[in-house]
Image (spheres, coloured by chain):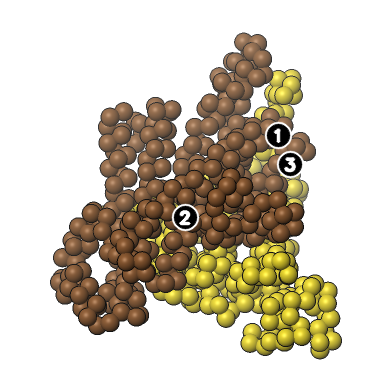
Chain colours: A brown, B yellow
Amino acid sequence: MGAYVARRLFFALFVLWGAVSVIFLVLRLVPGDPAVVLLGPDANPDQIAALRARMGLDQPIIVQYGIYMRDVVQLDFGDSFRFHTDAMDHVLAHLPNSAQLAVTSVCLALLVGFPLGIIAALKANTVVDRVISVFSLATQSLPNFWVGIVLILVFARGLQVLPSYGQGSWQHLVLPSVTLALPFLAILVRLTRSGLLEVIHEGYVQTARAKGLRERAVIFPHALRNALIPVITVVGLQFGALLGGTVIVETVFAWPGVGRVLIESISHRDYGVVQAAILLIAAAFVVTNLVVDLLYGYLDPRVRLAG
Amino acid sequence: MTDLVSDPTTSADAGRSNRPPRWPLPNRFRPGRASTPPRSRPGAGRIRFASAVVAVYVLAAVFGPRLVQYDPVATSTTDRLLPPGSRLSDGSLAVFGTDDVGRDLLAQIMQGARISIAVGVATLVLAGLIGITIGVLPGYFGGWLDGALMRLADIQLTFPSILLAIFIAALLGPSVVNVVIVLAISNWVTFARVTRAQVLTTKGRDFVDATRTLGARTWHLLRRCILPACTAPILVVATVEIGSVILAEASLSFLGLGTPTSTPSWGITISNGRNYLSDAWWISTIPGIALAVLVVSFGILGDALRDRFDPKLKNL
């Protein structure tokens, strides 16, 4: 287990390093002086010259990369020139709001998705299964910004039971988290269903049946436990899509999270904040994947050996 | 729950619907196969249905803008925010209503179909070219480049693709060409992986060795033996991907990072309609339905093609 944890940790760091390097590379591949890009079109020549010197843009590219990595390791992305505060601090201040939204959505998806998937598998090829499958296929492909708008139309404008934007009470959390949870929920339903159907015909499940166990005792401890192992990996991978989704959902519902900060900073060309926000979301994703990998190795010892 | 206990034989096929029982020998020994083709192949109905919907969209995208004129800069204050089914001031019928400056929504949606499908196809061609080249050449020859590119693919797969797209789009600025570049960069990995896997399994097959023994050059082997074996999985991947590419384009445009605000793409129209939700629900809702139906159809088509041609790609 120790070697496995070390290997996964190393890979997580490797991915983070990759993300940082890609940002560096993209900043330099895009036409224009990175200093001008970072400061925006309104910067005066003195500011540009100062930033060029600080970023070491007159140095060879390897040295520039070294300087950039040194700054990143110290979480230094410069200042936000809209708010004149440290870019990372500005993003971090909005992290709790995004975390609240993401965690609520994941819980919602898990609480509804697993039961629906189990029901669909147990009633495979019946009307119930068809209805659940069509529902999950539709919700998986619906554009989440559009779902958000329709939910606002129905529940905020039409029925007037829930607030349409902003943050505050638990009512404010309902529409954004439902919007964010839907595609995730759909994938959970489909995976739980197919996972359970695959496992149900395995020898050990038939043995459990042959022992005369009740159906409930067969499904829950025996079948479900093993059916869920592959589901966990995909949950980790899909968490990335969910984080990407927060950017859109936060924009639709004017939710003051990291995603909205990201989009606002882009339209104001506040690239220090953009970099900080992107790296923060990427880091959240890498950490989740690390946890999922470790959990996977714990649940299924075969994974540790295979690598 | 009881049906699982009482009848394990039928429930064995529960996950795979309507599939005929497996013939125990290779198909060429199957009686009567030469004269009668298999009657129902998996997913035939789904493929027909989804292709029909996609065909309607393609037709609307190609011919629609010729039938219903759309002028992106025209404004008509008398025709502002008319509900679906209204008559415009020039006497024509606005089936889906008009937007905030009096432009016909149906015409706008058909223009949007044009943009979405064009961006989707262009992105797939570009991503496919990058992905297939990277999948075939290093996959066939191996070596350090192969290792390095696959590590790069690993990194990119563990990174939310929409984030990468947002970052690049933010720096490049909104334009149709930039959207295609951005989406191709964030979608080449799937093509590369699927192609590479197929190349690796094909290059060790006997018929490839036989062709090489007969004196075929590498180029001939790649072109006549390896690539044809990759076609089916690549087509399946392309169908599965095009829906998500179209969705990503709309998302980027909605955020103001995709096509420029002057273009009538679905994401832009939906975003415009947000300001008029209380007065004109149709501006945001109807283009969203158009988008959703197209994406769901591509989803169904991709699933069905995958089931038929390449069930191995299940976890794509």
| A266 on left or right of A117 | left
SS at circle 1: loop
Of the image marks 1 and 3, the number of the one nearer the N terminus: 1
Instruction: Report whether mark 2 lies on the same chain as mark 3.
Output: yes
Chain designation of label 2? A
Instruction: Report whether mark 1 lies on the same chain as mark 3.
Output: yes
In the displayed structure, B176 sits above or below B136; it is below
Residue at mark 3: A130
Chain designation of label 1? A
Residue displayed at 32% across by 57% down: A88
Q: How far apart are the two marked residues, 2 and 3, measured between alpha carbons? A: 37 Å
Residue displayed at 18% across by 69% down: A54
Residue displayed at 68% across by 35% down: A120
Given the image, on which type of amino acid does mark 2 rest? Gly
SS at circle 3: helix
In the displayed structure, B233 sits above or below B272; it is above
Quadrant assignment, res B120: bottom right
Chain designation of label 3? A
Given the image, on which type of amino acid does mark 1 rest? Ala
- Image coordinates of residue B309 in percent, x first then y, are 60, 51
Between residue A284 and residue A98, name the one nearer to us.
A98
Residue at mark 1: A124
Residue furthest front in the image: A168
Residue at mark 2: A257
